[in-house]
Amino acid sequence: MKVGLRKILIVDPDTKAARELSSFLVDEGYDVETSKGLTEAVERINEVKFDCIIMDVDLPEMKGYKAVPILKAIDPKVQIIMTVAENTVELEVKVRRQDIFYYYIKSFDREELKEAVRDVFKRLGKVKGVKKLNGQAKILLVDDDPYFVKATTPILLSEGYKVPYWPYPQFLKRQDLNFHPPQTENILKRTTMWRSQSSQPTFWSGLRSS
């Protein structure tokens, strides 16, 4: 499969941070440009087709989440990853109301951002060996707690995913038989483990590429 150019625009007034992120992504094989603010970004988007925009919340002209509709009006298909140095509940609510692909907190491991960027190009069919998604993405929800399933399913549905569900014991049994679950983009699995010297359970949850 031939993969075309994978173009990213970083919009961040912190030029040092933008350069460091650009270097990081270039090393990952992406074609990256940077801009200091919304005005410059709009000019570049009108000239160049970008697949992904990584934009900071704090722009010189306005808050980044307010700039999302402006950029989407120019290119509705561009995928936007919003970044922030310090997050708050109020800020996150405002950001997630916008049409963004991912919300990244800069204090987190940069590997998380790398995976988010990869997921953008996976969706676009620009990752080698991965086909472009033609319909809704699916997440297989695996858990033995009906309350967890009831709480999690509406969240995933609101993000546009199809959410098939398997009880965890059934999942384990079929995994032992080398059974492959229905074709999904991800598996969301939560297990509960009891520490040998503690009466408190430890929870783990996460998305795993299938």
Image (spheres, rainbow, N blue to C red):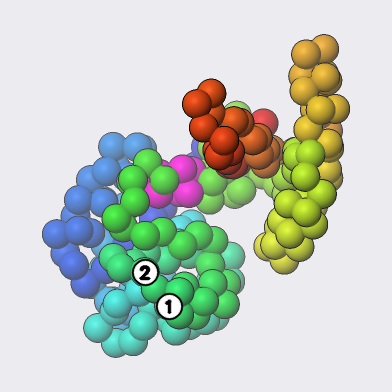
Q: Position of residue 4 (x, y in %)?
A: 49, 42
Q: Which residue is mark 2?
A: 87
Disc 1 marks a residue whose amino acid type is Leu
**Number of dots carrying numbers:** 2
Disc 1 + disc 2, Cβ < 8 Å: yes
Q: Position of residue 124 (x, y in %)?
A: 59, 49
Magenta part of the protein: which range?
113-118
Disc number at residue 91? 1
From the image, give the main secondary structure of the stretch colored magenta: helix
Disc 2 marks a residue whose amino acid type is Asn
Q: Position of residue 117 (x, y in %)?
A: 45, 49
**SS state under label 1:** helix
From the viewer's perspective, is residue 43 above or below residue 184?
Answer: below
Which residue lies at the image location 52% right of the left edge and 32% below the top edge? 198
Residue 196 relative to residue 146: left or right: left
Which residue lies at the image location 29% right of the left edge and 87% below the top edge? 61
- Badge 2 crowding class, 10 Å Cα cut-off, few under 14, some 14 to 19, many 20 or more, is some
From the viewer's side, name the closer residue of 134 and 45. Answer: 134
Q: Quadrant of the C terminus?
A: top right
Q: Quadrant of residue 161?
A: bottom right
Residue 22 relative to residue 95: left or right: left
Disc number at residue 33? none
**SS state under label 2:** loop
Q: Is residue 163 visible?
A: no
From the viewer's side, name the closer residue of 122 and 201. Answer: 201
Q: Position of residue 14 (x, y in %)?
A: 18, 67
